[in-house]
Image (cartoon, helix red, strand yellow):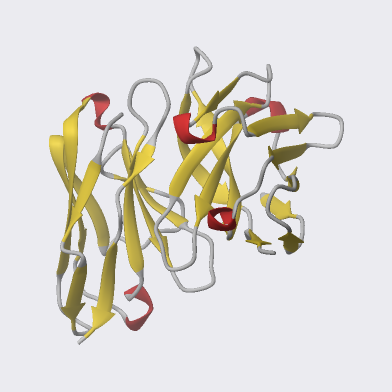
């Protein structure tokens, strides 16, 4: 069955960097993209960006530009989210989600989600 | 960037009742590139509806989506106890960045 399994809870100091992994299985990895979504405590869902697992093309939300990098390793069918210069308001749950892709490489909606990675950024 | 506004913020209903949740976009979403997700506490979001009205795999037929242009809705025909959760609409029209609505909390009355 299709599964996305994320890495575990992280506690970071402000200013540090974070790297979250998302191991995909049960489907052809390169036929889909991966979207990353952030959810602060008690808040809604925030689209951070996505990566096309076939060609590595990315698109990041404006507010994360310069601090975020999304990558994939097709040999291990794993996606990664790196977020640098962490701030206290980066405390959140981070989700990866399998994302359908159209013929031109544009992302559609996400259908399967990881379990989430809890990140606390605090001194 | 397309802004999605969901209403109401909270909806209080009883099991067996009908629920209608609204999602309004700041600009027209062509091809009905709109999805709905359900999220329960401590869980990841779950895809319910895509392309405004297509049910995702294994979603019960009491869930239905409708709308076009800037106005979309999610209807739950008869509420079951497990339906009480937070619901988000999500647009994936044009090129990224994509956006979510702020959510509607469906609570037991």
- Tell whether A79 sits left or right of B10: right
Which image quarter: residue A10?
bottom right
- Tell whether A86 sits left or right of B16: right
Identify which residue is drawn at 53% across, 67% down: B43
Give the mark count: 0
Is B11 located above or below residue A102 in the figure? below
Which image quarter: residue A35?
top right
Percent of width and height locating residue A27: 69, 39
- Farthest right residue? A75
Identify which residue is drawn at 53% across, 34% down: A49
Percent of width and height locating residue B7: 16, 58
Evaluate whether residue A82 shows in this view. yes
Is B60 located above or below residue B109 in the figure? above
Identify which residue is drawn at 31% across, 29% down: B1
Viewer-proximal residue among A64 and A5: A64
- Tell whether A83 sits left or right of A90: right
Percent of width and height locating residue A98: 59, 41
Is B13 located above or below residue A2 in the figure? below
Percent of width and height locating residue B16: 19, 81
Viewer-proximal residue among A80 and A77: A80
Evaluate whether residue A1 shows in this view. no
Viewer-proximal residue among B56 and A54: A54
Identify which residue is drawn at 51% across, 39% down: A48
Quadrant where the image shows the C terminus of chain B? bottom left
């Amino acid at each position: 069955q299709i599964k996305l399994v994320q890495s575990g809870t992280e506690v970071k100091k402000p200013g540090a960097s974070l790297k979250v992994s998302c191991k995909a299985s049960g489907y052809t990895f390169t036929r889909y993209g991966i979207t990353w979504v952030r959810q602060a405590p008690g808040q809604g869902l925030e689209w951070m960006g996505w990566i096309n697992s076939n060609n590595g093309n990315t698109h990041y939300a404006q507010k994360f530009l310069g601090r975020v990098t999304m990558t994939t390793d097709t040999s291990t069918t794993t996606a990664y989210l790196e977020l640098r210069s962490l701030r206290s308001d980066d405390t959140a749950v981070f989700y990866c989600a399998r994302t359908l892709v159209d013929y031109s490489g544009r992302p559609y909606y996400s259908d399967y989600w990881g379990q989430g990675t809890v990140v606390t950024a605090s001194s | 960037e397309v802004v999605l506004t969901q209403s109401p913020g909270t909806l209080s209903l009883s099991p067996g009742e009908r629920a209608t949740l609204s999602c309004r976009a700041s600009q027209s979403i062509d091809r009905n590139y709109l999805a709905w997700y359900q999220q329960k506490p401590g869980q990841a979001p779950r895809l319910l509806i895509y392309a405004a009205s297509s049910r995702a795999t294994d979603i019960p037929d009491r869930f239905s989506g409708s709308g076009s242009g800037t106005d979309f809705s999610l209807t739950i025909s008869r509420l079951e106890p497990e339906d009480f959760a937070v619901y988000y609409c999500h647009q994936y029209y044009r090129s990224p960045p994509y956006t979510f609505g702020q959510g509607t909390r469906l609570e037991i009355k």
